[in-house]
Image (spheres, helix red, strand yellow):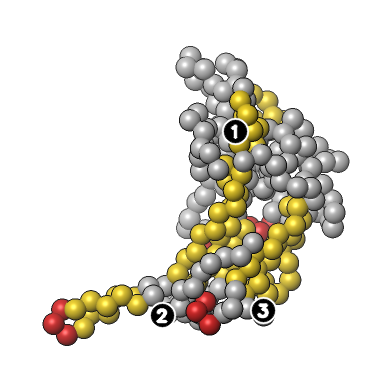
Amino acid sequence: MNISERQRSVKALFVVQKRAQPLLDGDNGATFFDTNSTGLSTLQQYQFRIGGRYFPGQPVQCSAQVGSAVNNGGCEAWLELCKALKIVGDYRLSTPANITRWAIQANTAGRLSEFDFNETILYTSRNTGCPVYMAQSGGFPCTANNSTSGTTGSNCFAMAINLETSNGVDISGLNAEEQSDISFMATWRLPQAPIPITGGSPSPANLEVYSFVDTMLVLRENNMIELIK
């Protein structure tokens, strides 16, 4: 996938997979690791190519082994995200992302967890990596009279890369103006597919790219402000 970003200083890139059409009763902020209806597609690896260079130098591995349907917990992808957010080893910050939400595959029925805390993961299949959910009492989705909640939040996953070239106190990102192209490359075990909706037609999923760039406001004579991108 080509990324049309031409800013002078790109500090980080984030790629997420989301529903193209939001749900009225779901979490529209959910981002998915795997949308194939079998739950066995499993993201194998991803990497960015900028000009003639690759970032990172080796693809970020997301499966337990090459071609496997079982993921590796998304540990490498998590570390790349931490580097892009500058929170590596920073324990002053807390996050709701955990192993029940990060890099979770669809279950064997092709359903994804995108209804915050409506379910609990009973266990994850050792052979396929697919989670087995238990819906809370009151049905799926929760009814108006149901005050119980599960322990599993909505799916979250991001494919990120840190492009910082210095300590970050100045214009320090990668110069995309001088690059011929920026490409994102990802490999899934099986093709991604429209996401099922309970009682409705499947909804397509999009890959969305968010770029973190430097901008600078320069105050010049006569109180003129110049924006440098």
What's the amino acid at mark 2? Asp
Residue topped by disc 1: 151
Q: Nearer the observer, disc 2 or disc 1? A: 2
In the rendered view, tell whether residue 199 sits above or below residue 221.
Answer: above
Image quadrant where one finds the C terminus: bottom left
Mark pair 2, 3: CA separation? 23 Å
Regarding residue 221, the answer to whether it shows in the image is: yes
Mark in front: 1 vs 3: 3
Rendered-image quadrant of the N terminus: bottom right
Among all residues in the image, which is located at the extreme bottom?
221
Residues at circles 2 and 3 in contact by the CB criterion of under 8 Å: no
For the point 74% across and 30% down, the residue is: 109
Residue at the image position 74 percent from the left and 36 percent from the top:
37
Circle 1 sits in a helix, a strand or a loop, which is it? loop
Horizontal side, residue 104 vs residue 128: left or right: left
Front residue of 176/11: it is 176
Element carrying mark 2: loop
Report helix, strand or loop for mark 3. strand
Disc assigned to residue 53: 3
Residue type marked 3: Arg
